[in-house]
Amino acid sequence: MPQQAAPKRHSGLAAAAGVAAVGGGVVAGELLAGFASPSLSPMTAVGGAVIDAVPPGVKDWAISLFGTADKAALLTGMALVIAAVAALAGVLEDRRRFTGAALAGLFGLAGAAAVLTRAQATPAALSLPIVAALIAAFLLRFLIKKLKAWRAEPAPDGQPRRSFLQALAITGTASAVGGAAAGMWRGAAIAVSDARGRLSLPPAASPAPAIPSGAEAGVAGLQPLVTPNPDFYRIDTALSVPSVNPDEWTLKVTGMVDREVRLTFAELLAKPLLERHITIACVSNGVGGDLIGNARWLGWPVRELLAEAGPRHGADMVLSRSADGWTAGTPLDILTDGERDALLAVGMNGEPLPLEHGFPVRLVVPGLYGYVSATKWVTELKVTRFADDAGYWTPRGWSERGPIKTSSRIDVPRSGRPVSAGAVVFAGVAWAQHTGIGKVELRINRGPWREAELAPGISHDTWYQWKLAADLTPGQYEVQVRAADLRGNVQDETQRPPAPDGATGFHTVRVDVKS
Ligand SMILES: Nc1nc2c(c(=O)[nH]1)N[C@H]1C(S)=C(S)[C@@H](COP(=O)(O)O)O[C@H]1N2
Ligand SMILES: [Mo]
């Protein structure tokens, strides 16, 4: 029997350590993406970049070879390449400290580069491949150190040997189990995001009214009047984004109605759809905050569906329920109002709803905070009474009713950035959904209010941009903004926190004017 249980080089074991370590990193990245948002998945980003990069001939060949399993084949191929590089990283790390870890790091950078080619290249999406690589590098160092310790003390039943094999087994098992979970979880999300990719929305029977010229105030630093989907704020209680297959989606109208109605996605798409710009806001948005966005929504008025069901006398609320169980309670009269386009929305800025924003169908109601109206992944509308039912947030300290409060924000100059003396341009947004903004005013150092130049709004349901140039000499200034709606109601000056029904107070910024 050989005394040396450990030969000079453990290439096989080093390679196995590499695969377990890198597997751990990749799986951690996928699980983090699963929790945060499916669009963040590093594997999906890399796969997408690969698909974009291969010549059409190769793509056709792959599709003819693998058929509808082409995606699975691609992922398998990627897994094999990653495993091969991981094995190499293990062997390298074993020969020379940090070389394998560096290879893992390079792989992370390649992943980040792949993310950069994607539409969803947000900081969070960019950071995930890096985080995955750091975890992989750390695990690799950890395992190889233990392997070397074993080699230094090669007794067949010694503690270092057991310690290495245990660490290898634990890392490998955790990666495999985590990978299987992430795979199942992501499989559903991939199927739904494929379905979304294949979908082409019908044109609107009633297109969005044209954006008036001059609605963009044209000041650098102002956010676009229509918020691009990747920049749109996201608020929900979903730990992972619900995967709702449009082919299986139905919406039922239940409760106090003459007839229960069931609507499929195909039926919904066949309805005469409206397209409208609507600015939605979160009740948690603090004064000056950014939990507000404006999009062009495509959808069918909820009033039409409710009319088919026939709400019974005495009903005053619609409890909308999401696929993940979340609920919102919306006044029935607002949903049935012929003058207010509360939509069962399927489109956002010309595309199907992004998964995070409620694919395949959500509610959008002009004038109400999201928590009482904007149910994403909506699957049920229960016609009921405020006396009998409550939406998710109401028993949790938030008001039963949530009309959006008239408010305004200073976006330019950016806070903390000094400006030069002379004509200083101030600009921002103001909103009074469904009433419209009549006036925006600014005051400097609590002086008189000065009326800002108000850009035309897209509609009363959207925010408006404004600007004002003020001549300022060097010094420190406190600048405040206030808006009034078209009925002349000035926004509330009292400083109140978001709970229970929306923050109030004037947005106040400090401006440093330099000579
Ligand atoms: N299913 C579901 N829908 C939801 C929520 C939620 O937690 N779950 N949050 C609501 C809240 S509080 C807001 S402000 C809006 C935000 O919509 P957005 O994420 O598309 O911006 O969604 C609403 N719809
Ligand atoms: Mo919200």
Image (cartoon, grey):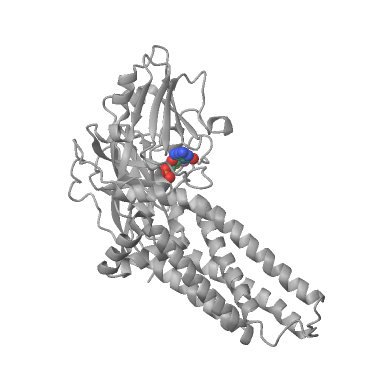
Image-quadrant location for residue 201: top left
**Considering only vertical position in the picture, is 506 above or below 398?**
below
Relative to 119, residue 114 above or below: below
Query: Among all residues in the image, which is located at the extreme front?
Result: 1
Residue at position x 24%, y 31% from top? 271
Rendered residue at 41%/66% (across/down): 46
468 lies above or below 78: above
Q: In which quarter of the image is ligand 1?
A: top left
The picture places residue 105, in percent across and down from the top left corner, at: 52, 76
Using residue 64 as the reference point, say whether residue 122 is left or right of it: right
Q: Is residue 512 visible?
A: no
Q: Position of residue 184 (x, y in %)?
A: 51, 51
Task: Indicate the quadrant containing the N terminus: top left, top right, bottom left or bottom right.
Answer: bottom right
Given residues 299 and 148, the one toward you in this image is 148
User: Residue drawn 38% across and 56% down?
Assistant: 69
Residue 379 is at least partly visible in this image = yes
Relative depth, front residue between 470 and 165? 165
Residue under the point 17% across and 49% down: 213
- 501 vs 246, nearest the viewer: 246
Query: Of all residues shown, which one is farthest toward the top?
Result: 313
Image coordinates for residue 206, horizontal then vertical, percent: 19, 36
Judge from the rendering whether residue 465 lies leftward or rightward of residue 112; answer left or right.
left
Q: Quadrant of residue 132?
A: bottom right
> x%, y% of residue 18?
59, 74
Asked whether, in this view, residue 482 is left or right of residue 158, the answer is left
Quarter of the figure with residue 473: bottom left
Name the quadrant of the C terminus.
Answer: bottom left
